[in-house]
Each structure stands twice: as C-alpha cells, then as structure tokens.
Image (spheres, rainbow, N blue to C red):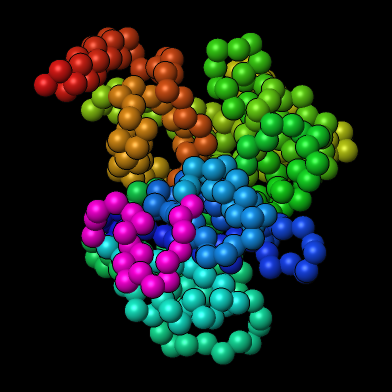
Amino acid sequence: MEKSGVRGLVLDDSVLVAAGEAGSATQPRPGAESLLRHLRHSGIPTRIACGEDLPAEKLCLLKKMAASYSFECFALDVASTELGGAFNDGEGCVIYVISSSKKDVCTSLNHCNLLTIVLLDIHGESQSPSLLYINTLGELPLTLCNLIKQVAGSNLLKVGYIMKPSRAEDFAKVDDFNEQGLVPHLSEAKLSLPFIVKPQVACGVADSHSMAIVFRNEDIKELKVPLPAIIQEYVDHSSTLYKFYVLGERIFHAVKRSIPNAPVLMKLSESNGLKPLAFDSLKSLPTATGDNGDFMANARTLDLDLVNTAAKWLMGKLKLTIFGFDVVVEERGGDHVIVDLNYLPSFKEVPDDIAIPAFWDAIKSKFESRRG
C-alpha cells in the first residue's frame, strides 16, 4: 500500500449493520456484503470498528461478517488520537467510514489523523466542508478510488482494473443453485446478464470443464454445473482469448478462438426459449454460424505491457512461480479482464524446447532464492 498512500480503511459498525426498528432482527445494511466482498479483493487493509456498549446481537453479526471476509474487528476508542495504530507500520493515511447517525462520534474523530467519509442516513442532511459524504455503500469503491489517486498523485502504480467502477464486482461464488435468496444476491452483486457459470475446480475432475451461459436470473436454479461454482459477468470479447503462461521470470502467451459475443449467444438460445447454454469448454464451445474466418478481425488490441505487469503482480500476490491465466479484452471499452487462473496449467501452447528449459530455470531459481 505504500504506492497508494493509503495505509488502511476502517469501517464503523454503523455502516455495516442497519439500525432497524425496535424489536426487529439485526441485519446487514443493503450493499454491506457486496462491499466487503469487493474490499477483500481490493488489497486495501480493512478493519471493522465496534463501538462501546454495542448490543450483543449486533456485535455477533459484525464478527460473523468480518470472519466471512477475513477481516478483523476491534473496539473503537474515540478518545484515541491514533486510530491508525489498528494497522501495521507504514506510511499513508487511514480512511474512516461512518454513518451520519453517529454525529457525536464524527465530532470526536476530528482530532484524529483520518480522512473521514460519512454515509448519509437521511437525504438532505447538513454537511461539513471538512468531511466527504456518500449516499449509499455502492458509492464507496469509486470514492476510495478517487481518494487513492489524490493521495498518491503521480506516484500511483496502476495494475489491472481493481476498483474500476465497471468491473467493481463482476463475479460471485455459489455453493447451491437452490440457495434461498440467491437471485436477489446476484442482483446485489451488480452482475449484468448474461452470466457464465463454471466450476471453481478448474482441473483434476472429469466435469471440471462443464460450464453454462445464463440469460435470466431465474434459470440459475436449473444448472448442472459442478459445485461450488463461480458466476462471472460475461464480457464481449470478439471470440478472442489470450492464454498467458508464467514460468518464473518468463511470460508466454497464445491467442485462441473463444466464445462469440452475447448477441450471438442469445440468438443461438432463442430456439430453446433463452434457456441456459450448457457446454464443455474443451469439446463443445458455442460458435457462431459461419464463424470460420479471422476470429481476431474485430478484436481490440492487447496491451501486452499491462498484462505482463499484472502477471508479475499476481506472482508476488499469490506467491506462485509457475501458473497460467486467461485474459479477454472487452470489445467496446478495451478493459483487460482476467477470467481464469490455474496454478499448474498444461503449457500446451508453448513448444517443449522452450517450455522445458524455462520450467527448470524457474524451479532452480525458486530453490536458490529459498536456500540463500
């Protein structure tokens, strides 16, 4: 986080748990689960502050939410002058997000070295020029993105599209297609139809390549895709897939024919009442009629430097030396989206006389780095 200039993010309990009516069950605020999922993948160190005298039911819910997304809760001491102590040593500011319903705490935080964002509970509430305001939790990711850019200035290193609004939440994980509330959950996650649904296990079992493309939320219950499954927003990419292979310091890539754009897929499914298109990614990819020409003719240009930078970032983040990932380039805007990652791919697109020496060089380099 040194490059971003932001040391950490504190979420006050008031922005995650709804106030509710007296006697009503304690529930997360709308958008709270989606926000936590987003932050878990953003790389921003995040902790949840629990106020003094918090009811046991609320405290229990907060701890459960925190554990679900690998965050920690801590007791809020508004008298403290250094809430940044909630994070490890490092330079940069700490951002505190709190509800406007806790005006007294907002005032108490003025003495702390914080950037404060206030979630407005009532439209039209009076605002202080020294604070930042949002109307919904859905606005927080973009607000954080803008803050990080302002704090980092010209030193900001941009790798991929983490926190980019259009890709803020383009996937979800599901353990049961008949899970109660799954369809509303998909709507909350802001996934745009159509979806592509694939097994979380990408290799090693017979049906790991069994996938489906879904055009309506309610059809998710009919799927036969192995569970647990990943649901991703389908990205139009001109039938072009870029397969990247990382072998230590060497990065290779190949271009492969892929699935057509969504309008073509919908036409293929029209005869079946727009039911999901089930397929095997190795044997029966959906294709457009007469699609035998240059499948890259309409493809957006690949930014190889960007993807190579992302590959090195993934190597450090995941602590992997040998892995592969697939990239598609969104047809309209040119977004580069990583759609799959495999910790030990086949490398079948890399010639043996290149792959084998590179493989052993990577193993030797890793061994020597650990020994020395």
Q: Residue furthest left?
A: 372
Outermost residue on the front side: it is: 53
Q: Position of residue 42 (x, y in %)?
A: 44, 50
Q: Nearer the viewer, residue 97 or 173?
A: 97
Instruction: Please provide percent x and percent y for residue 278.
Output: 74, 26
Residue in the picture at 74% in, 31% down: 176
Q: Along the line of sight, which residue is nearer the eye, 310 or 95? A: 95
Point 52% across, 65% down: residue: 52
Determine which quarter of the picture holds residue 323: top left
Which of the pair 358/313 is nearer the observer?
Answer: 313
The image quadrant that residue 17 belongs to is bottom right
Q: Left of 191 or right of it: where is 22?
A: right
Quadrant assignment for the C terminus: top left
Query: In this rendering, would 108 be left or right of 55?
Result: left
**Residue 15 visible in the picture:** no
Give the tally of numbered discs: 0
Can you give x and y, in whole percent of width and height, for residue 175 in the image?
69, 31
Q: Main secondary structure of the magenta part?
A: loop
Q: Is residue 136 above or below residue 211?
A: below
Q: Is residue 79 left or right of residue 360?
A: right
Q: Residue at x 62, y 34 (%)?
A: 230
**Residue drawn at (40%, 42%) of the image:** 302
Percent of width and height locating residue 29: 66, 61
301 vs 28: above or below: above
> In this picture, is 74 found above or below 262?
below
| Boundaries of the magenta span | 73-91
Indicate left or right for 299 with 280 as reference.
Answer: left
Q: Is residue 87 magenta?
A: yes
Q: Kindly tell me whether residue 265 is visible in this rendering.
A: yes
Is 78 one of the magenta-colored residues? Answer: yes
